[in-house]
Amino acid sequence: MENLNGTVLISVILVGVVVALFRNFKQRVGKQNAQAPPAKKKKEEYDIVCMYGSQTGTAEGFAKILSNEAESFGLKSKVVDLEDFDQENFLDSSEKHPYYVFLMATYGEGDPTDNAVQFMNFVTDEDNSTDSDLEHVKYSVYGLGNKQYTHFNATAKKLDKSLKKRGAQRSCEIGTGDDDEDIESDFRDWKTNFWKTVAADLGVSVDISQVKQKKPGSHLKLVVHENETEANIPRDFNPNPSTNAFDAVHPFECQVLVNRELFVSDRSCRHIELTMHDDVYYETGDHLGVLPENPPALVQAIAKRLSLNTSTVVSIESLDSSISASKLPFQGKLTIGDVLGRCPDLTCTVSPQVLSSLALFATDPKQEQELNMLSSKEGQVCYLLYLLLLLL
């Protein structure tokens, strides 16, 4: 069997980007039979909890960076998908609470992301809240938005306003990242100020330059299925097992029935009709996202560069019991060709965050130093000049 570099493949997957499918959909929810409440387990305590509302994965990535830095400072930290938000625990003032950091993307016309809808409904519910029911909560907010849209960072601003109205205490100035410019640079600037501001609250000394990053994919295991072939892999698209609904990570496959230009102008405006899944209903105002695949020639070139066979069948397992299967980069078995074709965006400009991650895998100290330099704020000009030279 060929030498399969699983760690490199996982790191390529993790720095990829997915886009959203339908935002709104009706779900069928079954009634649960009444059962005796299970015995309460002792809750694990954390110093800081990074919660994210993410549509394409950027906010989730930022949450993991903050959590990693927190652990480097000797703090116990975890990352939480707002889809798994524990409302009862959040309201319980008798419990010891961690410091909460919310990384909130704004989607569409000022809307929260799919995984943050229920959380935002809870936070902004004035009928079932008071001006002091969250006095025990200390928090910070970083927003991810785009100034090309009218409602720039609306979700983060609304969250901050609602939390303050209910008595929660914000320690750090709210961050408003702009994806139209350089949202990663915005985030780096904000988190530097964040750590300086909240260090006293958390009882730590902070030196960002001493932070040691974890290798992407270190909590995952790549499994190679030697006796499997591409023909044996089902191409079924299934809903999110935890919600029984389709979402950005669990899309459904549809066919394009009609695709025509509506009128002649200097801009394209097309009429497109698609087949729908039985459990998905389109409503006025819904958003449709497209999940493009990378060009086959590019997939083959990347696979060759990484010494990978595109027909090899693989799956991913989590080495962390707290991470469910639904949170993995992909579920089930796929060929490496399909993984590279669907999971990462191989056509975009490599971001500073990706450069920093790749530096962790460098075996040549000089290359590691160069990658770290290009990923730093000081090295951004050099990186832009390097990209311009590639285009000449």
Image (tube, rainbow, N blue to C red):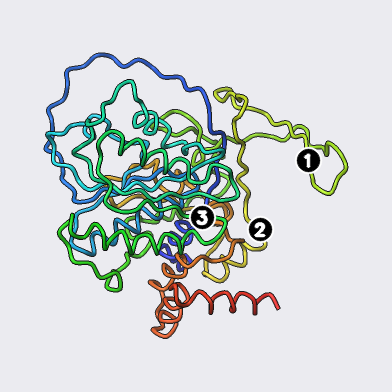
- The kind of residue on which mark 1 rests is Cys
* Left or right: where 160 falls relative to 244: left
Mark 3 or 1: the one toward you: 3
- The kind of residue on which mark 2 rests is Pro
In this picture, is 52 found above or below 127?
A: below
Q: Which class describes the residues within 10 Å of circle 2: few (<14), some (14-19), or many (20+)?
A: few
- Residue carrying label 3: 178
Residue sitting at x 33%, y 64%: 192
In the foreground, 179 or 272: 179
Spatial CA span between label 3 and label 1: 27 Å
Q: What mark, if any, has residue 269 been given in the picture?
A: 1
Pointers 2 and 1 in contact (C-beta within 8 Å): no
Q: What mark, if any, has residue 296 been given in the picture?
A: 2
Residue sitting at x 45%, y 61%: 186
- The kind of residue on which mark 3 rests is Asp
* Left or right: where 78 falls relative to 83: left
Extreme bottom residue here?
366
Mark 2 or 1: the one toward you: 1
* Image position, residue 356 (x, y; %): 42, 70
In the foreground, 281 or 312: 281
